[in-house]
Amino acid sequence: MLAASKALPIKENIMDFDAAKQRRALQARSYVRLAPNIVHLNTVHGNHEVALEVEAGIGSLTFYEGNPVQSAELLMAAAEAVTAQDRSIKSVVFEGHQASLPRHISGTDGRLDSAILWQWPSLWLPQLSYPLPPVQQMTAGRYHPRRPAKPKGTVYQRFIPWLERDISFRVADPETDLAAFHRWMNDEQVHTIWEDAGSIDKHREILEERIADPHVLPLIGSFADIPFGYFEVYWAKENRLGPFYDADDYDRGWHVAIGEPDYRGKKWISAWLPSLMHFIFLDDPRTQRIVGEPRASHEQQIRNLDRSGFAKVKHFDFPHKRALLVMLTRERFFGDHLWVPAS
């Protein structure tokens, strides 16, 4: 008779464990440059001061105050702090702490590549999405992958050092956000672009329709928990844009309505635009291109997109407007460190 085998403990998937641990350890982090070569870092591990030296694109970090723990999460937070505003730093090394980094994120030379760091989703996504396998389906004559169930709540959060506050995106709620959405859609500047002014019942129907639509993720953007605008992230293949170019299965596009006048202008765009692009690329690693279709006559928006790394592809005609197809690639965004705004 076979002896009963002793039950082995269930080992957590190391990636799931790391992600959960990182999200817990890195919540509410912030940082500030006290001097060109000194960064003050605040995380759940406490307050730390880090010395920075940059040579040939390599940032060398030394913790010299705050008794740093041997924590990969703390090291990654420090690397984020020094690469969040400086495009010249291509990789980071830690004096005396390289061994604390997980092998799957650091190179054989102990360096942490900033393009890898900024593609590590658990640093900025409070809840991780697990992309569905590419099972195809047909919707309104368009052949595309089945899309995952939509999340609820906050999907992205990032500290913006030049504003000294967080930006976050959360999924829109027809009850909680209806009053603000109604006011924003009736704003004269928003209506000029969106052409969706109307009653509160109309706007409730719009929000409910967007939430029910599998190809659209409606989001509310907030600075320091103050809602400032409405965003739609969509899968391009099922969108009205899809037939106008050779859309890839995982291309995504976006629309924006900045509803609060106080949050319009360059310093705010420099935060929400790269942060939204960052979220889109992190949400599904198979997304290699982000597209947009601004009005061809909207010169200011096109200038903003050009400064943010979008290439102008072609003009084309929607039934309701002449548009410019613009495109941002994953390689360009992370290779050129475009989470840092253009100076």
Image (cartoon, grey):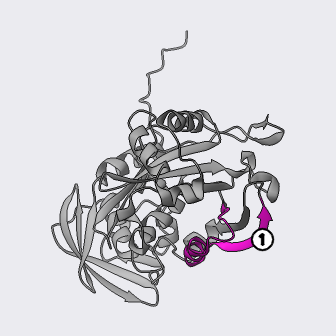
The residue that mark 1 highlights is 314
Count of marks, rendered view: 1
Residue 228, x across and y down, in percent:
39, 55
Q: Quick one: 91 or 199, which is closer to the camera?
A: 199
The residue positioned farthest toward the top in the image shown: 1
Task: Name the image quarter holding the C terminus.
Answer: bottom left
Q: Write down the quadrant of residue 264 in the picture.
A: bottom left
* Residue 76 position (above or below residue 230): below
**Left or right: 224, with 187 as reference point:** left
**Identity of the amino acid at label 1?**
Lys
**Left or right: 133, with 173 as reference point:** right
Q: Answer yes or no: is residue 327 visible.
A: yes
Dot 1 lies on which element? strand
Residue 206, x across and y down, in percent:
56, 38
The local crowd at label 1, few if under 14, some if 14 to 19, many if 20 or more residues have their Cα within 10 Å, is: some
The residue positioned farthest toward the left in the image shown: 66
The residue positioned farthest toward the right in the image shown: 141
Residue 289, x across and y down, in percent:
67, 62
Q: Write down the quadrant of residue 142 in the picture.
A: top right
Magenta-tinted stretch: 291-317
User: Is residue 331 inside the magenta stretch?
Assistant: no
**Left or right: 66, with 285 as reference point:** left
User: Is residue 313 inside the magenta stretch?
Assistant: yes
Task: Name the image quarter holding the N terminus.
Answer: top right
Residue 244, x across and y down, in percent:
81, 58
User: Going 38% across and 68% down the picture, which residue do you hit?
Assistant: 80
* Residue 11 position (above or below residue 72): above
Q: Write down the quadrant of residue 265 in the picture.
A: bottom left
Q: Answer yes or no: is residue 100 visible.
A: no
* Residue 145 position (above or below residue 266): above
Q: Quick one: 165 or 5, which is closer to the camera?
A: 165
User: Going 49% across and 66% down the picture, which residue do you hit?
Assistant: 274
